[in-house]
Amino acid sequence: MREKMVLYFPATVVEQPLTYSLIKDYNLMINILKANINPKMEGRIVAEISGEKKDFHAGLEFLQSRGVRVFPLEQEIVWVEERCTHCGACTVICPAGALVLERPEMIVRFKGDKCIICEHCITACPSRAMEVRY
Amino acid sequence: MTKKTYEEINEKIRAGEAVVVTAEEVISLVKERGTAETASYVDVVTTGTFGPMCSSGAFLNLGHPKPRMRMSKVLLNGVEAYAGIAAVDAYLGATQIPETDPANKSFPGHFNYGGGHVLEDLVAGKEVFLDAYSYGTDCYPRKTYQKTITLKDIPYAVLYNTRNAYQNYNVAVNLSDRTLYTYMGLLKPNLGNANYSTAGQLSPLFNDPCYRTLGLGTKIFLGGGVGYVSWFGTQHSPGAPRGENGVPLSPAGTLAVIGDLKQMSARWLRGVSFLGYGASLMVGIGIPIPILDEEMLKYTAVSDEEIFTPVVDYSEAYPQGTGEVLGRVSYAQLKSGQITLGEKAIPTAPLSSYAGARQIAGILKEWIQKGEFLLTKPAFNLPLTGEGVDYKGSVGGEIS
Ligand code: SF4
Ligand code: SF4
């Protein structure tokens, strides 16, 4: 199975190599989409985790046993097509190739499966056609 | 030798017999049939552009409340419209932001709502809150007026843009090591991207580069309705260097345009926000070019490979007005998604919607084919070099 998850790390475990254990001990593939540590030294990681169903659940249980709070990612980026002018400004901003200008039509397409939810496009889109939804 | 007059072309339009093609379609026609044959066959070429044009706004006459009022301060959804004209007239500019907007105090500012957005809301038929103040006079005693209104409640509303449809525009890049937030969009450090904002071969002023058919009174598609060229635009600088095809190699001509706001649509007047820069309005403009002779046909057949524009550094050269140009690229290169400057490949992005420009040219073509839209001969043409104006500023100037 493959899920996008949000992991909240308390300050006490931020420096432990927990993701390494997930890979090594639970055979999970971890694709970190976004990671940040706030001034209180608490961490938040958005990651796509994939592997066998059994490993997946065991891995998450392991994280929870170490004080990490785990939630499925319910945030998503939506492209409000009616507001999109197909200007193309977002296409050099998106780091994941999720917003692309199709040539020669010069029409912009949003490929949601490629989106890493970095949110760069939200304020970079002049028409405010990109939105975060929870 | 093909020679056609405006009257002859309009006669054909009225009869539903005019041959109308877009500025994109004419390119392949010329490749197939040559210029002489295409010139006699085609009567009108339609052009289009849909991009951010900051020098835009509308004169609004808000109607007299009872008792009467000489509005000296007018706010629409919190955005101030200039009221230093007659009693209930005001000019709402596209880049005006609410007094409460923190602007760039927390950098980069978001500028989520401004004059351009109020204009979009008005043409979309949405309710807008009018808040007006006055010092009161014997003839105009009322001092405050608050009311929720729609465009229908505004007796007169005229879009009047003083600088639109720039003939060519800079490609913006960033040589510095920090991100720049500009009216040309977000520019990543160390030549991370190159932004441009012209529709190239579809853009109106590239298709009549020497203004043979453009001037006061030229009837156009404006914001989804019918408008007119009302003057040459501010910073109109026809003396810019030109290629052999007459096409300027840097920003040159501009248009002032006017039209009835009530005919327009939110599809083609769109409030936009530039991170760290401000609010603006995307305006859709389409101009029909009459094929008076083979020379006009040649002008309209110009393609992206033959139109060049300067690459300018927005970390230093542009803000300091040095006029330095890093190189020139063609619109064909820009549209391919990548340009090269020296050794470096730089990804490109447009700010002006080519898809929108193509649609506008298509709509205008349809209007003319249906016989609904006749062409007008200008009362005078936009000045060309040596004919009065020549802007002496450095390359660019805030985008039209
Ligand atoms: S920047 Fe916004 S309006 Fe422009 S193409 Fe991207 S999503 Fe559409
Ligand atoms: S959030 Fe926006 S910029 Fe970031 S990856 Fe998704 S589409 Fe691209």
Image (cartoon, coloured by chain):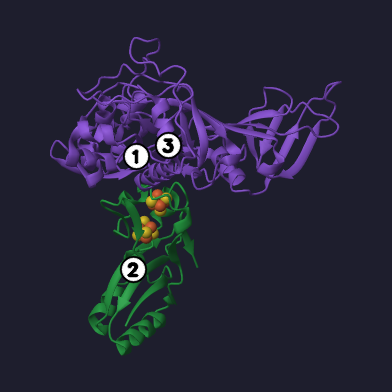
Side of A109 relative to B32 (left or right): right
Name the spot of residue B348 as percent of width and height, x first.
27, 44
Q: Secondary structure at mark 1?
A: loop
Give the Cα distance between marks 2 and 3. 49 Å
Crowdedness of circle 3 by 10 Å Cα count: few (<14), some, many (20+)? many
User: To which chain does the residue with label 3 belong?
Assistant: B
User: To which chain does the residue with label 2 belong?
Assistant: A
Residue B264 appears in the figure: yes
Q: Which residue is mark 1?
A: B19
User: To which chain does the residue with label 1 belong?
Assistant: B
Q: Quadrant of the N terminus of chain B?
A: top left
Side of A69 relative to A24 (left or right): right
- Residue depicted at x 35% and y 16%: B384
Name the spot of residue B55 as percent of width and height, x first.
49, 30
Q: Which residue is mark 2?
A: A113
Residue B13's disc is 3
The answer to whether residue A7 is above or below residue B217 is below
Crowdedness of circle 2 by 10 Å Cα count: few (<14), some, many (20+)? few
- Residue depicted at x 26% and y 51%: A104
Crowdedness of circle 1 by 10 Å Cα count: few (<14), some, many (20+)? some
The answer to whether residue B310 is above or below residue A75 is above
Give the Cα distance between marks 2 and 1. 45 Å
Disc 1 Cβ-to-ligand 1 distance below 8 Å: no
